Amino acid sequence: MRKKAFPIIVVTTITIVLSLSMTLMGHGGLFRMGENFVRDILLLKTEQERSPNDRIKLITIDDYSMQQFGAYPWPRSVYAQLIEQLMNAGAKSVLLDLLMLDPSADLSDDEELAATINKWPRVYVPLQVNFPPLQDYANRMNITRIDRPAATLRVNPKQVGHANVMPDKDGVIRKLTIGLPDESGQWIPSIDVLLANEMLPADQRIEWQESSQSWKRGGVDIPTEGWNQVTVDFYSSAYDDKSTVIQGYDRQSFADVLFGNIEPEYYKDCIVIIGPSSRSLGDMHMTPISRSIPLHGLEVHANMIQSLVEGHFYKEIPTAAAFLVLFVAVILAYASGHMLRGIRGLGMIILLIGAYVVFGYVCFQWQSVYIPFLYGWIGMILGYMIAAGKRSEEERRGRKHVTHLFGRYVSPQVVKQLLESEVPIKPGGNRMDVTVMFIDMRGFTPLSEQLPPEQTIAILNEYLHLCTDTIFRFEGTLDKFLGDGVMAIFGAPYRMEQHAERAAKAAAELLVHAFELQEKLERESGIIVRFGVGLESGEAVVGNVGSEKLRMDYTAIGDTVNIAARLESKAGPGQVLIGPNAASRIADSFPLRTIGPMTLKGKSEPVMVFELQLEEHLKKRL
């Protein structure tokens, strides 16, 4: 795989997986539940921002009313009396939010309520649609049966709507199901749609349009999802029975209204919902604004009616746009992980996630559009982690390569220090204080003319290995092989103290081990080969020299290097010659013999030369 293609493949894969997850998981899945939780936070409003419609009023069947009328259920004639009062007083419409599926024991009660409902066409009652536990199709609801009001109530089908509320997997109601199919496939509108249409002008009413196969409000499509659901807003806050301050929609006790404590004219031109609000009667639901204290069913209906009236619907971002948003988010996160490291990379991904949140909030507030928040965050984190992991792996392989490559030139300890160092080696070189060592094999050229090439190479490799091993043990850097010679640097590329002493020790140890190797070769083949060594300390330019595009060598140049090279050429077999600067640094630690001024090639003035005394070292090794 080409490296350039890797980011695109990763970003595209993450985006596709998340997009499929959003599409296929639908209403379920852990990710979807997390996404819903984030969206619930967006729906939260302050008390000042909540503005329940004062034309929607609630009459509650509460504990106080049950104390007045006795055990529940009550005679249906009681509802008929209240509805009659409300409609005569000018109420726009009344919803009796009770499922009355069976005939009353006293049919006269049903007759009285039936007469009232038939008298007032704007009085509505609910039915209930039942479903199988599992649906065969994602975008079409299958039903098992429909529970309609008792036949004894003789309710006009136009005055009936479904009261089904469908919570998500976490039990929270976020969506209104605008319509459900009946046994013949005809749509049964939500009871909330029927009540909202009573408040809407004729040209703004909600209806099913067969030609476009969509629900419309005033000719504009309502953004329904699968199962004809639309995400709605919530305007009331949760409250419990101990609340002393009225929160949410205006609500009054059933008994107070029926007994005249609240004048029926109070409900003139209002939508009135009559329903249970006692905990003993159930019908309580969790909503995005009420997780600890659920809302009663009649208040859920009030919120949904207001959402339909205001036309405030939240819709999902289109699939193609969601894919594009995810793709851009993931690629930006991947780029930050690839280009930045450490705190800067972490800071950038946090900044990107923050920008993504702001973008999503703006879409939600200004366009009522949901973008995939959680999926976007997951994609960005995954993209960043994959890029950072890939970069870390590349750096690890790079360090391994450098260790392997540089390990051929310097000791493992120096390699480790170089990799841990924050100071880069500048292209073109740095001025550094170093000690330069040149080593040459005396007598090797005539030897190579006498021996077969294979044996010559074997002997040469054995000597060069000895040089390399000794240099590395004293943390020197192998600069290069010069035929049968070696150039080494002490004090670069990593700066070190007392590099002259390290070089002198390496030279002494090298000649000691060379003496042992010489004895071995002399016993085996009669061959005698010795080293000549030159050392000098001082400033040199150390770095990359050569062609930037073709080949570069890591080396040192300068007068210090020249002096060390000339001293090596003057050194006899088994002799270590040392320049004046190096001698001044090691004089207190090593026995030196003054040779005197020596004229070196390329130097206009004679150079004071010293020799490292090796007799004591040799005696200890013999």
Image (cartoon, helix red, strand yellow):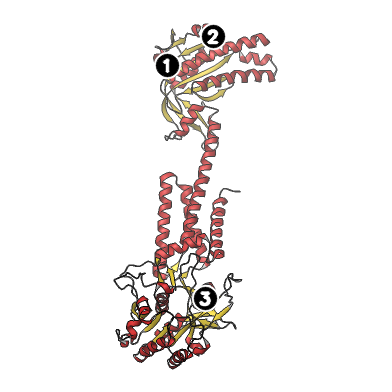
- Tell me the amino acid under the disc marked 2: Arg
Foreground mark, 3 or 1, reads 3
Q: Secondary structure at mark 2?
A: helix
Residue tagged 3 = 228
Crowd class of label 3 (few under 14; some 14 to 19; many from 20; radius 10 Å): some
Percent from the top left, x then y, of residue 293? 39, 67
In screen coordinates, is 437 left or right of 2? left
| Residue in the foreground of this view, choosing between 532 and 548 | 532
The quadrant in which residue 400 appears is top right
Question: Mark 2–mark 3 contact, CB under 8 Å?
Answer: no
Quarter of the picture holding the C terminus: top right
What label sits on residue 40 in the rendered view? none
Q: Secondary structure at mark 1?
A: helix
Percent from the top left, x then y, of residue 331? 50, 55
Crowd class of label 2 (few under 14; some 14 to 19; many from 20; radius 10 Å): few
**Does 11 appear above or below 391?**
below
Q: Is residue 357 visible?
A: yes
| Residue in the foreground of this view, choosing between 275 and 588 | 275
- Tell me the amino acid under the disc marked 1: Ala
In screen coordinates, is 515 left or right of 76? right
Percent from the top left, x then y, of residue 180? 53, 79
Foreground mark, 1 or 2, reads 2
Foreground mark, 2 or 3, reads 3
- Tell me the amino acid under the disc marked 3: Asn
N-terminal of the two: label 2 or label 3?
A: 3
Residue tagged 2 = 621
What label sits on residue 582 in the rendered view? 1
N-terminal of the two: label 1 or label 2?
A: 1
**Does 306 appear above or below 240?**
below
Crowd class of label 1 (few under 14; some 14 to 19; many from 20; radius 10 Å): many
